[in-house]
């Protein structure tokens, strides 16, 4: 079985694959102080009875401190099995049509690979994580660039920190867009505001990808916070929560021969 490991700024997501089937996935909190030994112990504990069935690993990390410990863990605990860490120089087949390809995060790279695998058209990938990433992909699978916006949780935390009368609230839809109390006002602004932000960015990117709407463009949502916005978005056409894990699997298949 192939273990895929996606280390993000907020969460570490594990996926276990048997061929093309995602057997299971797990999520844990990212801690930049975590050691290689702690990481290995936690991974093994989450995998449970599947821990000894791992025959390959594909991983990425957007957190430099954890990336260092991830490498140590792979070398110490998984020395005898094939593995890759996605980074510049790893073969993916994705052309990076940006000013500085080395600046493109590994998560955006594998998301591009997975989106092109799922769709033969141009794509927009909206990744709802610590930041909200909106990335553009050509019909040929080329990474064209995108836009960053503050993530939902970052914005909620900042608002609660800087506004004395406001506080964190449960992120659920209010009774109406016009809030009748402080909690509903916050919920409305966060949920509908972020949906509007995403829709605005997506529409502008789609116009550049397909002038005049001549070519179809798929809009995929992924990331742990995507479910909060899905029902309110007017532009997202597909929810693929395992998109990054799928990209890691595809990257492994391109680099490790059976």
Image: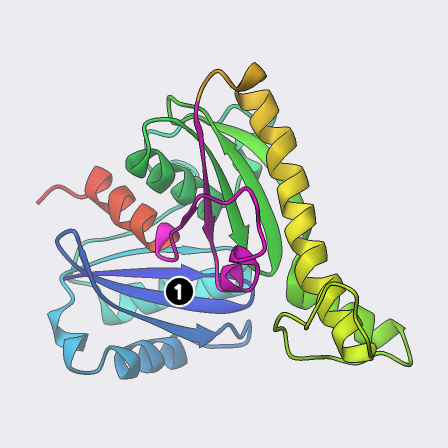
Report the span colored magenta: 216-243
**Percent from the top left, x then y, of residue 178?**
79, 65
**What quarter of the picture does the N terminus occupy?**
bottom left
**Percent from the top left, x then y, of residue 104?**
53, 39
Residue closest to the far right: 164
**What quarter of the picture does the C terminus occupy?**
top left
Q: 236 above or below 71?
A: above
41 on left or right of 170 = left
Is 51 included in the stretch rendered in magenta? no
Q: Residues within 10 Å of mark 1 (few under 14, many from 20)?
A: many
**Percent from the top left, x then y, of residue 130?**
60, 61
Foreground pick, 6 / 196? 196
**Percent from the top left, x then y, of residue 105?**
51, 45
**To which quarter of the image does residue 122 belong?**
top left
Foreground pick, 237 / 62? 237
Residue drawn 33% across and 55% down? 245
Q: 45 above or below 143?
A: below
Residue 91 visible to an observer of this rendering: no
In the rendered view, how is the structure colored? Answer: rainbow
Residue 117 visible to an observer of this rendering: yes
Number of numbered discs visible in the structure rendering: 1
Residue closest to the far left: 258
**To which quarter of the image does residue 203 belong?**
top right
Which element carries disc 1, helix, strand or loop?
A: helix
Is 242 included in the stretch rendered in magenta? yes
Residue drawn 35% across and 81% down? 42
Q: 95 above or below 154?
A: above
Residue drawn 29% across and 36% down? 117
Residue drawn 51% across and 72% down? 30
215 on left or right of 172 = left
Which residue is identified by label 1?
70
């Amino acid at each position: 079985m192939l273990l895929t490991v996606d280390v993000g700024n907020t969460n570490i997501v594990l996926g276990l694959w048997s061929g093309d089937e995602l057997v299971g996935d797990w999520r844990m909190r990212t801690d930049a102080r975590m050691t290689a030994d702690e990481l290995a112990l936690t991974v093994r504990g989450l995998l449970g009875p599947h821990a000894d069935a791992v025959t390959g690993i594909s991983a990425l990390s957007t957190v430099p401190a954890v990336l260092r410990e991830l490498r140590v863990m792979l070398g110490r605990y998984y020395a005898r099995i094939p593995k890759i860490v996605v980074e510049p120089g790893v073969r993916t087949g994705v052309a990076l049509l940006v000013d500085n390809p080395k600046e493109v995060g590994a998560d955006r790279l594998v998301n591009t690979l997975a989106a092109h695998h799922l769709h033969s058209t141009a794509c927009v990938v909206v990744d709802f994580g610590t930041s909200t990433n909106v990335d553009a992909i050509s019909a040929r699978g080329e990474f064209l660039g995108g836009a960053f916006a503050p993530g939902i949780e970052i914005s909620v935390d900042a608002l609660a920190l800087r506004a004395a009368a406001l506080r964190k609230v449960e992120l659920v839809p209010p009774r109406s867009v016009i809030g009748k109390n402080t909690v509903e006002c916050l919920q409305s602004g966060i949920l509908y505001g972020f949906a509007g932000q995403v829709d605005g960015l997506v529409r502008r990117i789609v116009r550049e990808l397909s002038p005049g709407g001549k070519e179809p463009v798929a809009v995929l949502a992924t990331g742990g916070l995507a479910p909060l916005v899905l029902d309110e978005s007017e532009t997202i056409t597909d929810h693929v929560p395992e998109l990054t894990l799928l990209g890691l699997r595809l990257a492994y298949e391109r680099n490790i021969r059976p």
